[in-house]
Image (tube, rainbow, N blue to C red):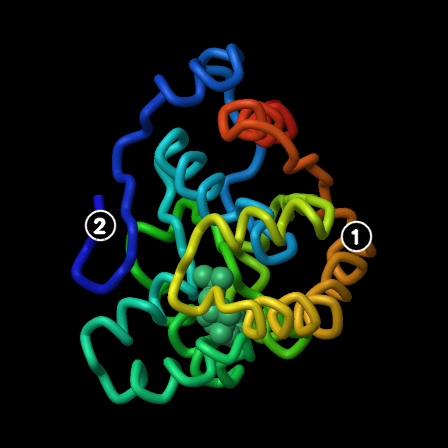
Amino acid sequence: MQTARGVTRHPTPDHGITDRASGIGHRALMGRRLLMLGPPGAGKGTQAEMLCRAIGIPHVSTGMMLRDHVERGTDLGARAKEIMDAGDLVPDDIVIAMVEERLSAEDAVCGFLLDGFPRTRAQAEALDHVLGSDRPLEVVINLMAPEEEVLQRILARGRSDDTEEAVRTRIAVYGEQTAPLIEFYEARGLLTQVDGVGGIDAVLARVVAVLAA
Ligand code: AMP
């Protein structure tokens, strides 16, 4: 279900997706406060969407929220569009405020999956602050895909910010600002690596498998 603000809610778990993709049935999944990391084009959005539908948690995608602002023509959208089209990062304070507001909604109390946030160390630290000690992150999934694969996927996708130059910038920005978060979460014992190469259902099965208790 898509709400007017670009926020996807999945109030009812759809176990069918979990079953189909993994064959693990209705076994409990470990952790419901999740974060998905990975390079642009690794398939985070697709996997996040399916996983959230499967286990009934909200999908919190800063990219989707920002695109929604652009579509609705808000002031924030007007500011963000140019930055997004160039493949750069929208300022931390803007995305942090969006995530803080979204995570304070009632449906995020029992779980959520963050996709595309945090992308910088400052965002990761702000997230810690927002979550506090009563609902810390439980699992960080690092969806891995080689550069040739992500480039092909992005070019096939054809989004408005998928020009060759913007894509090159996004990949460079990912390497400089976001990839260091892998180590940040690994040091806390939260990181789990998932191979993102393969069909959508095969990758989802791997994601579900690492979350299965
Ligand atoms: P995505 O849909 O996650 O690929 O994000 C699309 C674009 O939105 C990115 O290239 C950035 O310009 C912007 N964006 C999304 N999430 C963030 C974030 N956490 N911090 C800064 N910019 C972001």
Q: Residue at x 47, y 83 (%)?
A: 83
Q: Is residue 78 left or right of residue 22?
A: left
Which image quarter holds the N terminus? top left
Q: Quadrant of the C terminus?
A: top right
In the rendered structure, find residue 2 and report the number of the disc placed on it: 2
Camera sees residue 103: no
Q: Which mark is residue 171?
A: none
**In the displayed structure, does residue 189 sit left or right of residue 83?**
right
Quarter location, residue 165: bottom right
Residue 26 visible to an observer of this rendering: yes
Residue named by callout 1? 186
Whether the residue under disc 2 has CB within 8 Å of ligand 1: no
Relative to 187, say whether 81 is above or below: below
The answer to whether residue 154 is above or below residue 172 is: above
Mark 1 crowd level (few <14, some 14–19, many ≥20, 10 Å Cα): some
* Quadrant of the rendered image containing residue 46: top left
Of the numbered discs 2 and 1, the one sitting upstream in the chain is 2
Tag 1 secondary structure: helix
Can you give x and y, in whole percent of width and height, for residue 139 in the image? 63, 44
Amino acid type of the residue tagged 1 in the rendering = Glu
Label 2 or label 1, whichever lies nearer to me, is 2
**Direction from residue 133 to residue 163 in the image, left or right:** left
* Residue for point 42% across, 71% down: 100
